[in-house]
Image (cartoon, helix red, strand yellow):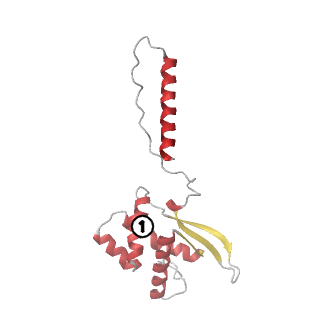
């Protein structure tokens, strides 16, 4: 009976399992997505998500804690710099598992595990666009016609574009 057994042992001893998950987590952080079996992907998700949560707050204690799990200073640096910046406002769910089908050799269920914020396909490829603040037009003097004022601004814009094209050539 499996009472109180929370995680998948993956048919490995404790040291082998920890080393394998640490290596897979480093590869995931470096490459942003990896292909593996479904069971290993689920185990990796439980292993890496608390580390990403710790990386949101960049303190020496959190860096040392994450380093004790990953044992790769380049992965820790990338996790605290790039990954933490992207997932700073996300409350959880930093990884996504996509099932790919069965492996040809042994018919094992394969999956791709990826960091959610680094996939441009599911995010729609949208870049974050900053809103521009629009101010009201300058107050026009009374009695001036509106159409000639619009023509002068168009002429000014064409003069600016022609001068910039001459400057680039």
Residue 72 shows up from this direction: yes
Residue 58 located left or right of residue 113: left
Q: Quadrant of residue 114?
A: bottom right
Identify the residue shown where x is 32% and y is 65%: 58
- From this view, report whether residue 99 is shown above or below residue 162: below
Residue beneath the point at 40% across and 60% down: 85
Residue receiving disc 1: 52
Image height of 129 relative to 20, above or below: above
What kind of element bears circle 1? helix
Q: Residue at x 51, y 51 (%)?
A: 127
Q: Is residue 87 visible?
A: no
Residue reaching furthest top? 143
- Choose between 46 and 137: the one closer to the eye: 137
Q: Image point 48% across, 27% down: which residue?
A: 153
**Residue 97, x across and y down, in percent:** 57, 67
Residue 117 vertical placement versus 50 (above, below): above
Q: Nearer the viewer, residue 65 or 128?
A: 128
The quadrant of the image that shows the N terminus is bottom right
Q: Residues within 10 Å of mark 1 (few under 14, many from 20)?
A: many
Most extreme residue toward the left is 60
**Outermost residue to the right:** 104
Name the quadrant containing residue 70: bottom left
Number of numbered discs on residues: 1
Nearer the observer, 77 or 91: 77
């Amino acid at each position: 009976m499996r009472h109180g057994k929370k995680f998948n042992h993956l048919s490995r001893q404790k040291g082998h399992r920890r080393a394998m998950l640490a290596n897979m987590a480093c590869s995931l952080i470096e490459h942003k997505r990896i292909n593996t079996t479904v069971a290993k992907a689920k185990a990796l998700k439980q292993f890496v998500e608390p580390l990403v949560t710790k990386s949101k707050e960049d303190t020496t204690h959190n860096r040392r804690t994450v380093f004790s799990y990953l044992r790769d200073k380049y992965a820790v640096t990338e996790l605290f710099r790039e990954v933490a910046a992207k997932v700073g406002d996300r409350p959880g769910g930093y990884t996504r598992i996509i099932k790919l089908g069965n492996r040809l050799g042994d018919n094992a269920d394969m999956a791709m595990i990826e960091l959610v914020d680094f996939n441009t396909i599911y995010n729609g490829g949208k870049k974050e666009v900053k809103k521009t603040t629009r101010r009201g037009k300058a107050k026009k003097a009374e009695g001036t016609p509106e159409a000639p004022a619009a023509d002068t601004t168009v002429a000014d814009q064409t003069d600016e574009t022609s001068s910039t094209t001459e400057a680039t050539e």
